[in-house]
Structures are given as C-alpha cells and as structure tokens.
Image (cartoon, rainbow, N blue to C red):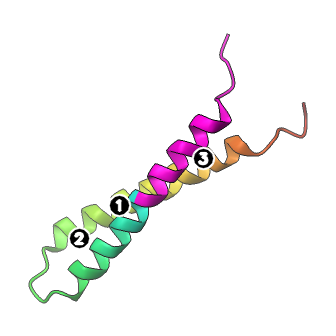
Amino acid sequence: MLRPPDPADVARRLTELRLEHRDLDAAIARMAEARDADQIALRRLKKRKLLLRDCIARLESQLIPDLDA
C-alpha cells in the first residue's frame, strides 16, 4: 500500500524545483539577449523550464488536502 508523501519532503522538493526554475529563467534571459545564442540550447532550456513548472504544479497539488476524504 502506498503511503501519502510527507509534506515536509514535498515542500523541500518544491523549494529545490522553484530555485532551479528561477535559475533557468535567468539563464534563458541572458542567452536570449546574446546575438550568437545557440537556439537549440535555448529551446532545451525552455523545455526544461516547462517540465519544472509542471513538476511544481503536481507537487503543489499534493500539498492541498483531498476534500473527498
């Protein structure tokens, strides 16, 4: 039987992901300003940022109590 995730662990992971998301945002902004920016690398960073956003949303939903319970 699966145990519900520990809220402290979820909160810790959320903090890590939000930090990485913010760092990626800054890196993307810097890279986008460069004239000779590698468009493929820029696209990869943007995809990673979107993936992080989805992971953050999923973890945030785990912290919301289940009203049907």
Q: Which residue is mark 2?
A: 42
Q: Say few, some or many: other residues with alpha carbon within 10 Å of mark 2 (under 14 / 14 to 19 / 20 or more).
A: some
Q: Name the residue rendered at 48%, 58% in the picture.
A: 18
Mark 2 or mark 1, which is nearer the start of the sequence?
Answer: 2
* Three-letter code, disc 2: Leu
Q: Real-space Cα distance between discs 1 and 2?
A: 9 Å
Q: Say few, some or many: other residues with alpha carbon within 10 Å of mark 3 (under 14 / 14 to 19 / 20 or more).
A: few
Nearer the camera: disc 1 or disc 3: 3
Q: Which residue is mark 1?
A: 47
Q: Real-space Cα distance between discs 2 and 3?
A: 25 Å
- Is 60 drawn above or below residue 19 in the view shown? above
Q: Name the residue rendered at 33%, 75% in the picture.
A: 26
- Is 37 drawn above or below residue 41 in the view shown? below
Q: Which residue is mark 3?
A: 58
Q: Residue furthest top?
A: 1
Mark 1 falls on what kind of element? helix
Q: Is residue 4 magenta-colored? A: yes
Q: Position of residue 35 (x, y in %)?
A: 12, 89
Mark 3 or mark 1, which is nearer the start of the sequence?
Answer: 1
Which contiguous range is marked in magenta?
1-19
Q: Name the residue rendered at 60%, 45% in the picture.
A: 11
Mark 3 or mark 2, which is nearer the start of the sequence?
Answer: 2
Q: Place residue 21 in its image quadrant.
A: bottom left
| CB-based contact (under 8 Å), mark 1 and mark 3 | no
Q: Is residue 16 magenta-colored? A: yes
* Three-letter code, disc 3: Arg
Mark 2 falls on what kind of element? helix
Quadrant housing the N terminus: top right
